[in-house]
Amino acid sequence: MAGHIRASGVVVYYLEQGEPNFLLLRSRRDRSWGFPKGHLLEGEGLLSGAMRELWEETGIREVTLVSGFTEHMTYRVNRAGRFRQKTVTYFLGRVETSAVRLSDEHSEHRWAVVEDARKILTFENLRTLVTRAWMLVAPLSPPLETESSPVP
């Protein structure tokens, strides 16, 4: 499609006491909350573009991708009074540290558990995305607490 915009990004999380915390970035331009992402360069692949954007926007280089998670979102954007289709492909990655170095594109960042992320994220499609990511990386059930019972 002529004028179709392609972008990619990474939903990043780290575990804090076994609970996934997701990295949210606030856009300096429109103040919306989202994930690290950006437009692909000419000839750039989806994954390499996502990794480049992650590095440029957060300073994060070391990330372990979660196999089997690739989400595509297509929506309309208004560019200079002209509506165009934009497709963003997101990958899911785990980091071992919460250290972030923000680019000038973002005014702040926040690490949030899924419930808080769903409240903070600006767009519904991103709230759905973080829920899908959480479902893949959260423990299936909390650890069972064992009770000791007296032996008769």
Image (cartoon, grey):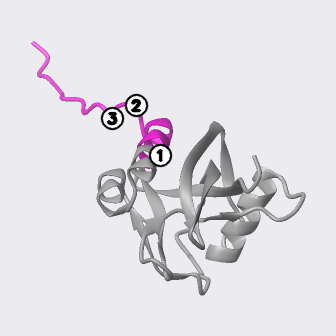
Residue that extends furthest to the top in the rendered view of this protein: 152
Query: Picture quarter containing residue 102?
Result: bottom right
SS for tag 2? loop
SS for tag 3? loop
Residue located 76% across and 67% down the image:
52
Q: Residues within 10 Å of mark 1 (few under 14, many from 20)?
A: some
Q: Which mark is residue 101?
A: none
Q: Residues within 10 Å of mark 2 (few under 14, many from 20)?
A: few
**Residue highlighted by disc 3:** 143
**Left or right relative to 135: residue 60:** right
What residue range appears in magenta? 129-152
Whether residues under marks 1 and 3 lie with C-beta atoms below 8 angstroms apart, the answer is: no
Find out whether residue 135 is within the magenta segment: yes
For the residues marked 1 and 3, what is the alpha-carbon distance in whole angstroms?
26 Å
Q: Earlier in the sequence, mark 2 or mark 1?
A: 1
SS for tag 1? helix
Please determine whether, in this image, residue 9 is positioned above or below residue 102.
above
Query: Picture quarter containing residue 70?
Result: top right
Q: Earlier in the sequence, mark 1 or mark 3?
A: 1
Please determine whether, in this image, residue 16 is positioned above or below residue 56.
above
Q: Amino acid at mark 3?
A: Pro
Placement of the C terminus among the 4 image quadrants: top left
Q: Which mark is residue 140?
A: 2
For the residues marked 2 and 1, what is the alpha-carbon distance in whole angstroms?
18 Å
Of residue 28 and residue 140, the one placed in the foreground of this image is 28
Please determine whether, in this image, residue 106 is positioned above or below residue 60.
below
**Residue highlighted by disc 1:** 129
